[in-house]
Image (spheres, rainbow, N blue to C red):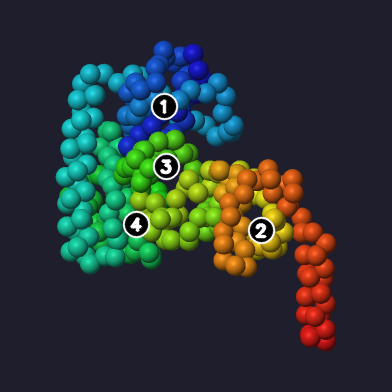
Amino acid sequence: MSRFVEVKFKGQRTGVYENKSNLSLKKGELVIVEAEKGIDLGRVNHFFDEVDTQDEMKKILRKATMEEMMQYRQKQINEEKALESCRGKVKKHRLNMQLVDCEYQFDGNKITFYFTSDQRVDFRELVKDLAAQYRTRIELRQIGVRDAAKRLGGYGVCGLKMCCTAWMREFTPISTQAAKDQNLPLNPNRLAGVCGRLKCCLMYERDFYNWATNKYPQLTKEIETEKGRGIIDRIDILKEEVIVKYDSGEVEVLPLSLVQEKYYHCNQECQRRENVENLKAETASN
């Protein structure tokens, strides 16, 4: 038996618990675990023999019973109702916040509302209203738009389940430089994911592209071919091709192997012209 078990809850929330009772568990089974001031119900997601932590871990108490599974279904219905009710109260208090999700602790000792906002929100009066209605502990948790997309789930433009929902455990910083490194057009509509931020998948092949581009001549580099003098206009890493544009406006596609063999470095004439231009520039600046 694995000593430690990762349990997944609603909205891709996970936690690692100690299987102190050596329960025989399978991935996907519903289990009852210790929670803050009570118990919670989640689904077995992964197993670990060791974990890197010195904190006291909460424990898996038992497998969920059939009755508890039925209670879990009712809890999902209650969450939808609570979310709709909270939206009405947000509107009533005129708060600048967008509710994303609602999660009941299984024993009902806590209800957590997740929301996004571009600023800090004073929701004290909202919490009072919710506490008076549900007679339990209320927590409002502000999350980012990427975390909101992860909680809600969905599908990307690729047609597959969003990576943050399917397998990603944490987000990494992403910048438009990742798109530039892959010669992608800097079109915000094409680069943005469901969350409105840059797609996580922009980082997946960045290292490969950075490695692969080292085999190619630099863009705008002058080369001489049988057709005359031209410049490197574009490169196609996947097809391993180099697109050369000549002074006449003609464009030629050459295989990378041919460019590496015959045309990669400027000939002496190209180098001479480059040196002359550099000398003129230095003379003009002085």
The residue under the point 55% across, 21% down is: 49
Tell me which label, 2 or 4, sits earlier in the chain: 4
Q: Which callout, 2 or 3, points at the residue further toward the start of the chain?
A: 3
Q: Residue at x 41, y 26 (%)?
A: 45
Residue at which label 3 appears: 164
Tell me the kind of residue under disc 2.
Lys
Which of the 4 quarters of the picture holds residue 110?
Answer: top left
Tell me where residue 191 sits by quadrant.
Answer: bottom left
Q: Secondary structure at mark 4?
A: strand
**Residue 159 location (% of width, % of height):** 34, 40
Q: Nearer the viewer, residue 67 or 221?
A: 221
Please give the residue where the numbered disc 4 appears in the rendered image: 116
Specify which label sits upstream in the sequence, 1 or 3.
1
At horizontal 49% and vertical 43% (from top left) the residue drawn is 170
Task: Give whichever of 200, 32 is nearer the camera.
Answer: 200
Determine whether the residue tagged by mark 3 lies in a helix, strand or loop.
helix
Label 3 neighbourhood size at 10 Å, few (<14), some (14-19), many (20+)?
some
> Marks 2 and 1: in contact by CB < 8 Å?
no
Q: CA distance from mark 1 to mark 2?
A: 62 Å
Q: CA distance from mark 1 to mark 3?
A: 15 Å
Q: CA distance from mark 4 to mark 3?
A: 17 Å
Per the image, the residue denoted by label 1 is: 45
